[in-house]
């Protein structure tokens, strides 16, 4: 049975943490706890996960909620709050929903955050719009010592796949860049399997398998963790499945 570490798990208790963007979404406006998520991996040997921040309204309350999850379930943490930096493996500030977008990467106060991430050896999770991937080349040039994970593979879209490939090819020489195979928000059972497999083939052609990290993006994406993991296996594109499904993540997100 394939071992699996989920490096992109969202969990929330709406009585403890308010998340405005869930309002009126019948599928997501409910509680999702760790035990419920764990059941999604019935066909895998589930060995752990990393909680990823949920773009909540109160980053401090979410941090306290996440710290409790860490204590109870030994989860690794990726937060948007550096107040508890000693407990973090990764930091993420969502940019694909911000009116500033990826331009935020170059603001003075964000540069100070990056300096702290490098000093504390905390990974930066880059969550940017597909249309703004070109910003990452300059950002990586400016921060060669920062470990950066591109969430959701850069949220590729079939309608602009050529532009996506051009942007990703410009990033392949950066040694500290990792690609997270966390299912994009809009992927579902109706997504083209041919496109997904072509996407995998492109990434394999341009990046070493040491740079790939599995994540489910549960429960935001409409693909279940089990379905998404099986698509990666079914594609038969990758040789080092253990690296993708758990070894790379455990190597990158060290310590706490």
Image: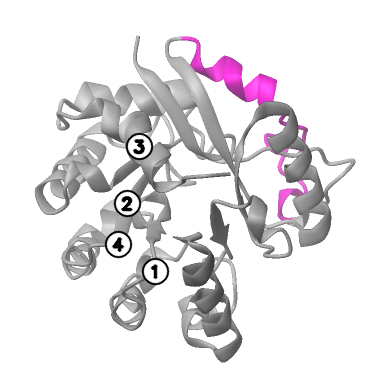
* CA gap, disc 3 and disc 2: 20 Å
Residue 83 horizontal/vertical position (percent): 73, 64
Q: Quadrant of the C terminus?
A: top right
Please report whichever mark, 4 or 3, sits nearer to the chain's N-terminal start: 4
Please report whichever mark, 3 or 1, sits nearer to the chain's N-terminal start: 1
Q: Nearer the viewer, mark 4 or mark 3?
A: 4
Residue 247 relative to residue 163: left or right? right
Q: Residue at x 54, y 51 (%)?
A: 89
Q: Residue at x 39, y 69 (%)?
A: 146
Instruction: Return the residue at label 1.
Output: 146
Residue 176: which numbered mark, if any? 4
The secondary structure type at the circle numbered 2 is: strand
Residue 200 or residue 61, whichever sits in front = 61
Query: Is 178 situated above or below 3?
Result: below
Identity of the residue furthest to the bottom in this view:
108
Colour basis: one colour
Residue 182 relative to residue 211: left or right? right
Residue 116 relative to residue 173: left or right? right
Residue 164 horizontal/vertical position (percent): 24, 62
* CA gap, disc 1 and disc 2: 14 Å
Q: Residue at x 34, y 33 (%)?
A: 247
* CA gap, disc 4 and disc 2: 10 Å
């Amino acid at each position: 049975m394939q071992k699996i570490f989920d490096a992109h798990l969202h969990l929330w208790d709406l009585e403890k943490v308010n998340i405005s963007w869930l309002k009126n979404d019948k599928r997501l406006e409910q509680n999702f706890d760790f035990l419920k998520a764990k059941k999604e991996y019935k066909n895998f040997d589930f060995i752990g996960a990393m909680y990823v921040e949920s773009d909540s309204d109160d980053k401090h309350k979410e941090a306290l909620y996440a710290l409790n999850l860490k204590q109870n379930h030994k989860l690794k943490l990726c937060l948007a709050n550096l107040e508890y930096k000693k407990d973090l493996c990764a930091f993420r500030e969502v940019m694909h929903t911000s009116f500033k977008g990826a331009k935020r990467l170059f603001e003075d106060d964000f540069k100070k955050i990056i300096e702290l991430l490098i000093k504390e050896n905390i990974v930066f999770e880059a969550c940017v719009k597909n249309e703004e991937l070109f910003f990452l080349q300059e950002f990586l040039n400016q921060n060669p010592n920062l470990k950066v994970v591109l969430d959701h593979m850069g949220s590729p879209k079939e309608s602009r796949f050529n532009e996506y490939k051009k942007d990703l090819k410009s990033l392949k020489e950066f040694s500290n860049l990792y690609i997270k195979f966390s299912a994009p928000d809009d992927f579902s059972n109706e997504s083209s399997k041919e496109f997904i497999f072509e996407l995998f083939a492109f990434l394999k052609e341009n990046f070493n398998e040491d740079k790939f990290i599995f994540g489910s993006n549960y429960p935001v994406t409409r693909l279940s963790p089990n379905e998404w993991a099986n698509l990666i296996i079914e594609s038969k594109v990758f040789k080092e499945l253990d690296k993708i499904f758990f070894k790379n993540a455990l190597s990158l997100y060290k310590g706490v």
